[in-house]
């Protein structure tokens, strides 16, 4: 009984393994069939692309890709089609898809090489360097990839130098602006200090003027002891000069000279002198006009 069970178990196990093998074989056959169909569609897409029918070729490439994810040629060729039309973003996506699907090193090399070319077009030189390096890992003998790698390194170094120079220039501009702002603030502070000093000086001047006026008032006052005359002295003066006290106040002011006032004769002399000077100036201007005409050097044709 035990032997029968063991044999039965072995048969079941064998049958399960056989079923698994059959399923795997069937899946493999289906995958090969799908790849073959995808390859045929890719072939048709290549012909349409050669005939400059991009729309038809793009549609067939997409069908080929959907048929089999093992078809490396379909996404790679579609990436080339996008690249030639300068659609670099879509081209990169298809190259990456081909690189992920590739199992052969030669196919991986081509995919990463073209990804590096897309990065070069986009001026992403650091990424281009890494892509070319990956391509060389899969095919170290490709001289074209090696040349592109050297070019990408050179362009990356130049780009980094330009970025550094731009940063230095921006920093210099910032420092210059900060210095100008600082000088402007200093000048503003100095102007404010100067204005305050002027106000202080003006205040001091007003104070001195007021002080002088106060002194003048004190000095100008008639002191009773020295300047005021007694009644007896005033009567004696009137007896000596009886007519002076009888003169009108207007005649007394006319007899006394007024400060900073010119006589009629002085005013007349000044007017005549000014008229003579103006006449001389006019004569000089007329003489200059006669001598100041420019000579024409250019010929009239």
Image (spheres, rainbow, N blue to C red):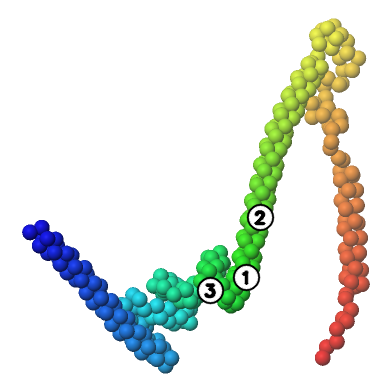
Left or right, residue 64 beside residue 205: left
Give the residue pinned by disc 2.
168
In the rendered image, residue 85, in percent from the top left (x then y), is placed at 46, 81
Q: Nearer the viewer, residue 25 or 183?
A: 25
Give the residue pinned by disc 3.
139
User: Where, quadrant-wise, is the N terminus in this rendering?
Assistant: bottom left
Q: Nearer the viewer, residue 253 or 283?
A: 283
Residue drawn at (89%, 79%) of the image: 295
Crowding at mark 2 (Cα within 10 Å: few <14, some 14-19, many 20+): few
In the rendered image, residue 48, in percent from the top left (x then y), is placed at 39, 90
- Sequence-first disc among 3 and 1: 3
Residue drawn at (81%, 14%) of the image: 222
Label 2, label 1: how far apart the Cα atoms are: 27 Å
Q: Do labels 2 and 1 touch, CB within 8 Å? A: no
Q: Do labels 3 and 1 touch, CB within 8 Å? A: no
In the rendered image, residue 264, in percent from the top left (x then y), is placed at 86, 43
Residue drawn at (74%, 30%) of the image: 201
Circle 3 SS class? loop
Residue drawn at (42%, 93%) of the image: 51
Which image quadrant is residue 8 in? bottom left
Which image quadrant is residue 234 in? top right
Left or right, residue 221 beside residue 2: right
Crowding at mark 3 (Cα within 10 Å: few <14, some 14-19, many 20+): some
Crowding at mark 1 (Cα within 10 Å: few <14, some 14-19, many 20+): some
Give the residue pinned by disc 1.
150
> Looking at the image, is 119 positioned above or below residue 184?
below
Which image quadrant is residue 294 in? bottom right
Label 3, label 2: how far apart the Cα atoms are: 41 Å
Mark 3 vs mark 2, foreground winner is 3
Circle 1 SS class? helix
């Amino acid at each position: 009984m035990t032997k029968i069970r063991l044999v039965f178990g072995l048969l079941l196990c064998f049958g399960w393994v056989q079923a698994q093998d059959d399923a795997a074989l069937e899946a493999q056959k289906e995958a090969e069939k799908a790849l073959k169909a995808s390859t045929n569609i890719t072939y048709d897409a290549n012909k349409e692309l050669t005939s400059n029918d991009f729309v038809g070729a793009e549609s067939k490439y997409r069908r080929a890709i959907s048929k089999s994810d093992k078809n490396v040629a379909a996404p790679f060729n579609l990436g080339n089609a996008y690249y030639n039309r300068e659609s670099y973003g879509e081209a990169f996506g298809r190259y990456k898809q081909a690189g992920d699907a590739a199992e052969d090193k030669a196919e991986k090399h081509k995919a990463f090489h073209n990804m590096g070319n897309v990065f070069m077009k986009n001026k992403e030189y650091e990424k281009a360097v890494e892509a070319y390096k990956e391509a060389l890992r899969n095919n170290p003998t490709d001289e074209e990839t090696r040349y592109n790698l050297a070019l990408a390194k050179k362009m990356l170094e130049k780009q980094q130098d330009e970025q550094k120079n731009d940063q230095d220039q921006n920093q210099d501009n910032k420092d210059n602006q900060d210095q100008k702002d600082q000088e402007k603030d200093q000048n503003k502070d100095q102007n404010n200090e100067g204005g305050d000093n002027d106000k202080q000086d003006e205040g001091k001047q007003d104070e001195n003027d007021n002080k002088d006026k106060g002194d003048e008032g004190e000095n100008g006052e008639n002191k009773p002891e020295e300047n005021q005359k007694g009644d007896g002295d005033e009567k004696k003066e009137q007896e000596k000069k009886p007519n002076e006290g009888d003169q009108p106040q207007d005649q007394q002011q006319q007899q006394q000279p007024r400060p900073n006032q010119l006589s009629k004769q002085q005013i007349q002399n000044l007017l005549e002198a000014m008229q003579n000077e103006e006449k001389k100036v006019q004569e000089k201007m007329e003489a200059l006009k006669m001598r100041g005409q420019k000579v024409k050097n250019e010929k009239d044709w």
